Image (cartoon, rainbow, N blue to C red):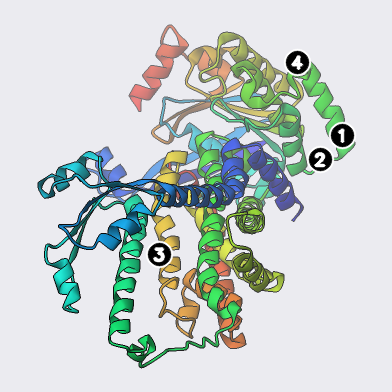
Amino acid sequence: MIVLDKVSKKFRLSKKQKREIGNGYKSNFIWSVSDVSFKCQPGRIFTLVGPNGAGKTTTLRMIATMLKPSSGKIRVAGYDTVKNPEHVRKNIGFLTGTTGLYARLTPKEFVKYYADLNGMDEAVFKKRRDDLFDILGINEFANRRIGKLSTGMKQKVSIARTMIHDPDVVIFDEPTVGLDVITSRSIIQLIKNSKKMGKTVIFSTHIMGEVSLISDDLAIIHNGKLLYNSTYENFIANMKTGTIEDEFIKIIKGA
Amino acid sequence: MKKTFIIFKKELLDTLRDKRTILVMIVIPLLLFPILINITTKITVKQRQKAEEKILNVALILNKNAESFKSLLKGNKKINLKENVKEHEITNKIRNGNIDFVIVFNKDFDSKVNARESGIVNLYYKSSEEVSIQKSRIVNLLKEFEDNLIFIRFKELKINRAIVKAVEINEHDIASMKEKFGEKIGGILPYIFVIFCFIGAMYPAIDLGAGEKERSTLETLLVSPAKRLQIVYGKFGVIFLAGIVTAVISVFSLFLTLKTSQEIPEEILTILLRIVDYKSILLVFTLLIPLCVFFAALLLSISIFAHSFKEAQSIMTPFNFLVIFPIFIGLFPGVKLDAVTALIPVLNVSLATKEIIFGTIKAGLLAEVYISLLILAGLSLCFCAKWFQRENIIFRNS
C-alpha cells in the first residue's frame, strides 16, 4: 500500500533556471509537486498520468525515498519514507525506461549485487533468480557482459533486478519510454503479473494507450497538482468527450 | 558495514574491468619509468657517442703561423683536415654543412706568441646540442697546443711551472652520501607518488560518480536498501585503493628500472638503493595514506557534482595544478619543513619526504604533518558524505 497525504515538493532554483523560466518569476523556489494526496491499493494498478514536467517523476522519487517531501507524509508498505527510508526501499522495486545497467557486469553479477544489497538469503536468492531467469529467458546470456546485450535483453535484466527481492510495492516510472513494441509488451505483462501476485503497483506514463490497457485507478497530474483521482471505471463512465486522449486534454486545459 | 563492503566489492570489480582505469592505474605507472629512463639514457648515450666519434671536417687557415698545430690536427684520425678554404667562404661552407669547424689564426699569431703575448685564434662553427660536444674536441686540441706553448715559455724563462699556482683548494665535503642524494631523491619521490596517487584515483572517481549519473545507474543504487553513507564509503574505498595502488606501482617501477638499468653507473646505483631503505619508504607511504583519503574524497565530491564524464574531467583538470604547484615549491632549495609548511597540504608531504630520505626528520614536525593530514582527510571525507546526501547535487541534471 502507498499513501500520500498532502505531499508537496519545492526545489531551489539556480539563477540560470530562473532566467529560463522568464522575467516575471520572482521566487527562488519552484513547486514541482503541490498538495498531492492519493492511495495505491495492493492488487491494483494505479496509473499516474501527466504531460512531461507534470511532477510524475518527482512524486515517484519521493515514494522511492530518493527525494524528501518538503511537506506532507508518505507511507509505503506501512513505513514512513522520511523516518524509515531503508525499510521502504527494502519493500520496493523501481523501474524506469531510462534505467541504466552496469555494462561491465554480467546479468548474474548484476542481479546478485542487488540481492546482496537487499540482504537476501543465498538459497532464497538462487531459487528466485533461477525462476526469474527462466520466465524472462535470461539464461542464454546470463554470463555475457551487459554492455554487449541488446536493448530488449537489457530490459529483461532490469526487470530481474527490480523483482529479485520480491518487493510488495512496484514503482514504474515511464518504463516503456524508447522501447520497441515487443519489449514494451513484456513490461506491460510484468505490470499485470505484479497485480496478479497482489503487489501494489504504481505506474506513470504519458501514453494514453497504456492507460486503457492496465489501469485500475487513475490520477492525472499537471503542473504539480492532482487534477483527477478515481477509479478507471469512473473515469470512463463520466467521460464527456469521445476518447480517453480528448478527455485527458480537456481536464488538463480546464485546470 | 556489510552493505558498504558489498558496494566496495562491486565497484572494485567494475573498476578493474575498465580498460581506461587499468591503463592509468597499472600500465602507465608500470611502463613509464622503464621507457622514460631506458630510452632517454640510451638516446643520450648514443648521441654523445655519435658526436664523439664523428669524423669532423675542419678547415684550417694558418696565415703562415703555428705549423705545429697543423701537425697536431693531422695526427688526429677523427679529423678530416681541409686547407684550401678562403676566409670569405667560411660562413657559407659551415651553413651548407661542408665544413664543421674553421680555425683561423691571426696573421700576427706567431709574432705575438714569440713576444710572449697572446696570439689570437678564431673558431667558427654553427651551434647546436650535437656541435657542443664536437666543439669540446676542437677546444681540447687548441688547449693541448696552448699547453705546449706555455711549457716552452716556462722552459725558456727557467721557471718551475708550479710557481704560478699560489693556492690549491682541497675540498672536503662532510655530507654523507645519504645527505647528498637525499635532497635530490627526496624532491623527486613525492613528485612521482603524489601525482600518480592523484591521477590513479581520478579515473575511478569520475567513473563511480559522474559515470553513474551519465549511464543512469545511480537511481537504481539509490533505491536499494543501502544508505547514502554506505554508498559513499563503498565508492570512496575503491577510489582510495586505486590512488594508493597507482602510487605504489609507480615507485616500485622506478626502483625496478633503477635496479635493472645498465646505463646508470654501478657506484651511484648502489648508493641510491642503499639510502632509500624500506623503512624510509614505508614511513613515506604512511604520509601518503591520509593524503590519498583527501584526494579520493575531493575527487569523489567533484565527480558527484558533475553530471557527465566530460564535465567531471574539466572540473578536475585545474585541481591537477593544485597538486603539482605545492610539490614544485617543495623542490626549491630554500623551502624547508617548519611549523608553517607542515600545515600546507601536499607541500608538507613533499618536504617531509625529503627529510625522511635525508634522514633529518624531526619527530615533532612529522607529528604535525600527520595531524594536519589526518584532520584534512577527516574533514574532506565528512564533506564528501554530506555532499552525497544533498538532493540538489545528486539530481543536479534533472
Write down the residue under mark 4. Answer: A137
Q: Extreme bottom residue here?
A: B166
| Relative horizontal placement of residue B363, taking residue B137 as reference (left or right) | right
- Residue at 32% x, 57% y is B71
Disc 1, disc 2: CB below 8 Å?
yes
| Relative horizontal placement of residue B315, taking residue B192 as reference (left or right) | left
Chain containing the residue with disc 2: A
Cα distance in 3D space between marks 3 and 4: 56 Å
Quadrant assignment, res A139 = top right
Write down the residue under mark 2. Answer: A120
Query: Who comes first in sequence, dot 1 or dot 4?
Result: 1
The amino acid beneath tag 4 is: Gly
Q: Which is closer to the viewer, label 3 or label 4?
A: 3
Q: Which is closer to the viewer, label 1 or label 4?
A: 4
Query: Who comes first in sequence, dot 4 or dot 2?
Result: 2
Write down the residue under mark 3. Answer: B325
The amino acid beneath tag 3 is: Phe
Task: Check chain identity for marks 4 and 2: say if they share one.
Answer: yes
Chain containing the residue with disc 1: A
In the rendered image, which quarter contains the N terminus of chain A?
top right
B365 or B107: nearer the eye?
B107
Chain containing the residue with disc 4: A
> The residue tagged with tag 2: helix, strand or loop?
loop
Disc 1, disc 4: CB below 8 Å?
no
Q: Relative to B120, is B15 above or below?
A: above
The amino acid beneath tag 1 is: Val
Quadrant assignment, res A50 = top left
